Image (cartoon, rainbow, N blue to C red):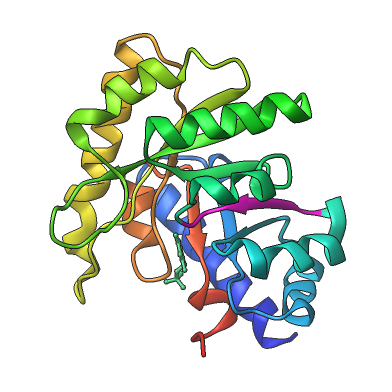
Amino acid sequence: MGLIAENIDDVLRKIENAARKSGRDAKDIKLIAVTKTVDINRIKEAVEAGLRIFGENRVQEALPKLKELGRIVSWHFIGHLQTNKVKDVAGNFDLIHAVDSLRLSEEIDRQAKKRDIVQEILIEVKLSEEESKFGMPEKGVLPLIERASEFENIKILGLMTIPPFFNDAEKTRPYFKRLREIRNEAVKKGFNLSELSMGMSHDFEIAIEEGATMVRIGTAIFGERK
Ligand SMILES: *Cc1c(COP(=O)(O)O)cnc(C)c1O
């Protein structure tokens, strides 16, 4: 077995364990393999090992990979998205993780309408002032959901966050818990948001314990990025 396949095995086992520990079913947790800086041959190894969802955060890097692998896998756009790049992303990616403004959601709706599709998105929430550059601050999240839900060509599936980095991953727990609470508040208000995209290589087990339905993992599968 190659190193990538071994790493995937290891990550899947950890997902299973974290799910079991918190009384969840591992089937409810999607593994998104993050392939930024990863070349196509190594991505193909991950496909051979059974992975079917891949995440990219730069449009120009992603498009040739999408072309090469085609629709045998699903692609998610996980990075910060500039309004002028939406035309290259809408329709090419099954899910856009990091929508953090009304303006951006408007543009996604507009581009999706042109293509006659409904683009699925997540709202990125900024839970810490110091660390994260992007994301909608907590108090703006519900108003954004309310407005963006009215657009016909986007569908909001849930929320996403990137907590600050801590050497002690346990310190990320309050951020993941808070994202789940915000999602639950939105559900109480009648919005059908089921997805929580949270957890990366060093903290995904904690994110799963706190309710993650999607974990975005790069380094733990493909090794350190150069
Ligand atoms: C790079 C990246 C990841 C994966 O990070 P790792 O620590 O390598 O697992 C997850 N989410 C986003 C938004 C990223 O840019």
Compared with residue 126, is residue 153 higher up or lower down, i.e. above or below? above
From the viewer's side, name the closer residue of 106 and 192.
106
Q: Is residue 173 left or right of residue 25?
A: left
Q: Percent position (x, y) of residue 29?
A: 53, 45
Q: Is residue 156 visible?
A: yes
Q: Which residues are magenta?
A: 73-79
Q: Percent position (x, y) of residue 161?
A: 34, 49
Q: Percent position (x, y) of residue 219?
A: 49, 77
Residue at the location (71% across, 61% down)? 51
From the viewer's side, name the closer residue of 29 and 61.
61
From the viewer's side, name the closer residue of 189 and 123.
123
Q: Determine the residue located farthest toward the top in the rendered image.
A: 190
Q: Is residue 43 left or right of residue 183?
A: right
Q: Percent position (x, y) of residue 175?
A: 21, 49
Q: Determine the residue located farthest toward the front in the rendered image.
A: 84
Quarter of the picture containing the N terminus is bottom right
Q: Is residue 195 visible?
A: no
Residue at the location (30% across, 12% down)? 188
Residue at the location (68% across, 52% down)? 75
Residue at the location (53% across, 17% down)? 151
Q: Determine the residue located farthest toward the bottom in the rendered image.
A: 226
Q: Is residue 175 left or right of residue 33?
A: left
Whether 136 is among the magenta residues is: no
Q: Splitting the image into four quadrants, where does ligand 1 fall?
A: bottom left
From the viewer's side, name the closer residue of 106 and 217.
106
Whether 77 is among the magenta residues is: yes
Report which quarter residue 142 is drawn in.
Answer: top left
